[in-house]
Image (cartoon, grey):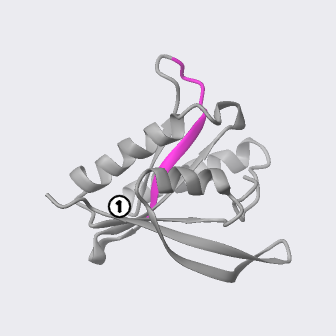
Amino acid sequence: MKYIGRPRPNGMEDIFTLLEKMKKMVTDNDGVTWAMTLKGDPKLMGHISFHRLIKEHDRAEIGYMMHPDFFGQGIMSEALKALLNYGFNTMGLHSIEAIASPLNNASIKILERNGFIREAYFKEIFCWEGQYLDSVVYSLIAPKK
């Protein structure tokens, strides 16, 4: 949560509220979130999602988060590859975008290793806890068939 401008869940009630929000995205066809676990282990280690669909442009924004115990093992890249495959080949998306903090080097490296290019850098685009923060936008266009 270090680079995400929203509060951490504060107890089970907040977590249930977040889960209901994710469920509503699926029901409303506005997005979908997958839990990430290691094969054969039900323990949640992170999640990955399409959380903003722009249907008229066949574009979606992705997001992901993983517990630090699992950093540096290639797990997020593997999940991202599966997400991109699903987005382009099952959902028929033309482009996928990711918005990140320019300070989040690990996330930016994952995006760049998976073919995303930087489209924009926004200075002080949003306010979090009284501080104006920058963001970068990365995107990937569907491979030509």
Report the front residue among 7 and 60. Answer: 60
> How many tags in the picture?
1
Q: Residue at x 72, y 52 (%)?
A: 1
* Magenta region: 41-52
Q: Residue furthest top?
A: 40
Q: Position of residue 86 (x, y in %)?
A: 30, 48
Q: Residue at x 72, y 59 (%)?
A: 3
Where in the figure is residue 139, as x and y percent of width and height? 42, 67
Residue at the (71%, 50%) spot, across then down: 14
Question: Is 119 in the magenta?
Answer: no
Left or right of 21: which side holds 2?
Answer: right
Per the image, the residue denoted by label 1 is: 29
In magenta segment, residue 51: yes
Q: Could you tell me which residue is drawn at 64 percent across and 73 percent down? A: 135
- Which element is circle 1 on? loop
State which quarter of the image contains the C terminus: bottom left
Task: Tell me where residue 103 appears, x and y as whole percent.
Answer: 72, 62
